Amino acid sequence: MFSKNGIPLYFQLKEHILKDINTNYKANDILPSESEIEEKYGVSRITVRKAIEELSREGIVVKKQGRGTFVREQKILYDANIIGSLTQRLTKQNHQLETKSIEYIIIKDEHHAKELLKCKTLLCIKRFRTLNDKSFALMLNYIDIDKVPNLEKKFDIESLYTFYNKTYGIKFYHAEETVEAKAATKEQAKRLELEENSPLLSLQRLSFDKNNNPIEYSDIVIKADMYKHKIILSS
């Protein structure tokens, strides 16, 4: 089953187990015992243990004393170094992000997003979204209503940024984004199926066009245990 190609045996075993996990297991499922894996793949107990240790180190599995080895809930990796919508990025990772409810709100009164976008009337797109059929995020997207006439009648795809570009020719070239930890409010907890005050990650983003004009502001909260943010730093 394993090739003699200079790649350590434990690493080859780890890759086989990982493929098995991705194909046949879901979060919190228990893996076969070390002796069962040893027999199935015809390797030593030391090789099995090292492979499991690697999977544990990478956050794929967790060993629970006296109970066994379990598949961990995997966090979604969000690469903050490339501009794009959450939907676009997660689709590339083969995750299914779906809108379960949507509401369109016209804001004429005073609002901080109006100052950021330098407009008179805002359209707020309010969405509750699931990831792979699990409650995932609450999203608020704000845009000058004059830039997206009749959006509520036309919006028919999951990716809002793709829709902006396809329908209105709006394309974002750069953005400013802040990330902070917040405790879930009573309303947020109910929608996301959490306990009140559970940890959330809050993302606020201001997106600009090629002429450096602010076009859209988004305010998103995501379940913290399903998400991690990746940022590349350079000198």
Image: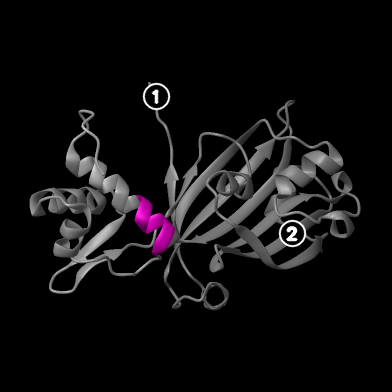
The residue depicted at 48 percent of the width and 70 percent of the height is 184
User: Does residue 140 appear to the left or right of 137 in the view shown?
Assistant: right
User: Does residue 199 appear to the left or right of 14 in the view shown?
Assistant: right
User: Does residue 213 appear to the left or right of 45 in the view shown?
Assistant: right
> Considering depth in this image, is 100 or 12 the residue closer to the camera?
12
SS type, badge 1: loop
Residue 161 in which image quadrant: top right
The range drawn in magenta is: 19-25
Q: Amino acid at mark 1?
A: Ser
Quadrant placement of the N terminus: top left
x, y percent for residue 218? 65, 51
Tell me the residue that label 1 is attached to.
234
The earlier-in-sequence mark between 2 and 1 is 2
Q: Amino acid at mark 2?
A: Ile
21 within the magenta span: yes
The residue depicted at 82 percent of the width and 55 percent of the height is 155
Residue 212 in which image quadrant: top right
Relative to 24, residue 67 above or below:
below
User: Does residue 8 appear to the left or right of 215 in the view shown?
Assistant: left
x, y percent for residue 166? 82, 40
The residue depicted at 13 percent of the width and 74 percent of the height is 66
